Image (tube, helix red, strand yellow):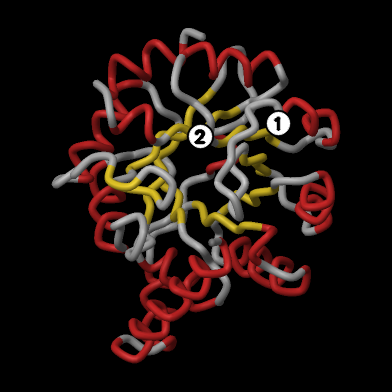
Amino acid sequence: MLADLVAGAREDAERRRAERPLAVVESAALAQAPAIDALAALAPAERVKIIAEVKRASPSRGALAEIPDPAAHAALYEAGGASAISVLTEERRFHGSLADLEAVRAAVSLPVLRKEFVSDPYQVFEARAAGADLVLLIVAALDQPQLTELHALVTELGMTSLVEAHTADELSRAFDTGARLVGVNARNLSTFELDRDLFGRLADRYPAGTIRVAESAVKTADDVAHYRSAGADVVLVGEALVTSDPVATLHEFLGA
């Protein structure tokens, strides 16, 4: 499944590149206002921080929410106390777009993450051109030279990489890039099975100075509390927020 998602995202990027060449996107990226400091926004604090996700669908769950106005939805996240907004831009299985990201960027003052299956520098330039402050890099989808190159480009453009791991080996590879914002995803992207305890088993491997992000398997405040007690500084939440009152749910989660 992961290989299919990466291949599809790359094909879609090639289609966009034919319509909007790299030189044009690079120029737009360099013309953007400086990215918001996501490391400062997500720095460890007395209470857990939440990255709230604009997410219409997923391969594992199908359609979740229509979200006709992603900007308005993101504004509710900001009002509810989220520390950053994640926007799915993958078109085929998650029904997102770069237009969603641009709309959200214009509507909120929080850092905005491009959640995509990134494997090409063109996608990184697209992210900055659309106003992204963070870019997701999935270790399992990239060899180490690719991961290192893409992380370096994200940093060069003033953004922050959220580097996502699923195993101890992938976590080591993430740290080898110098990434300071590193997530453990409870969802196996090959089988889509969930393991809520995976983060806790890997949390003590984080070096000092890195921000620990727990991703997936969050349905209730108890799940957030579980991750917090295991050492998470930040929890990324999608489905639970798009299928409920986002402000009320964020208040509940932030009190966990």
For marks 1 and 2, give the one nearer the viewer. Answer: 1
Whole-percent x, y for residue 168 in the image: 82, 44
Whole-percent x, y for residue 220 in the image: 45, 16
- Residue picked out by circle 2: 236
Above-or-below relation of 101 to 200: below
Is residue 103 rendered to the left or right of residue 55?
left
Above-or-below relation of 19 to 130: below
Give the SS element for disc 2: strand
Q: Residues within 10 Å of mark 1 (few under 14, many from 20)?
A: many
Instruction: Write down the quadrant of residue 81 in the picture.
Output: top left
- Residue picked out by circle 1: 199
Residue type marked 1: Phe
Q: Which mark is residue 104?
A: none
Name the residue at 63% across, 26% down.
233
Whole-percent x, y for residue 197 in the image: 70, 26
Name the residue at 32% across, 21% down.
80
**Pick the front one: 24 or 177:** 177
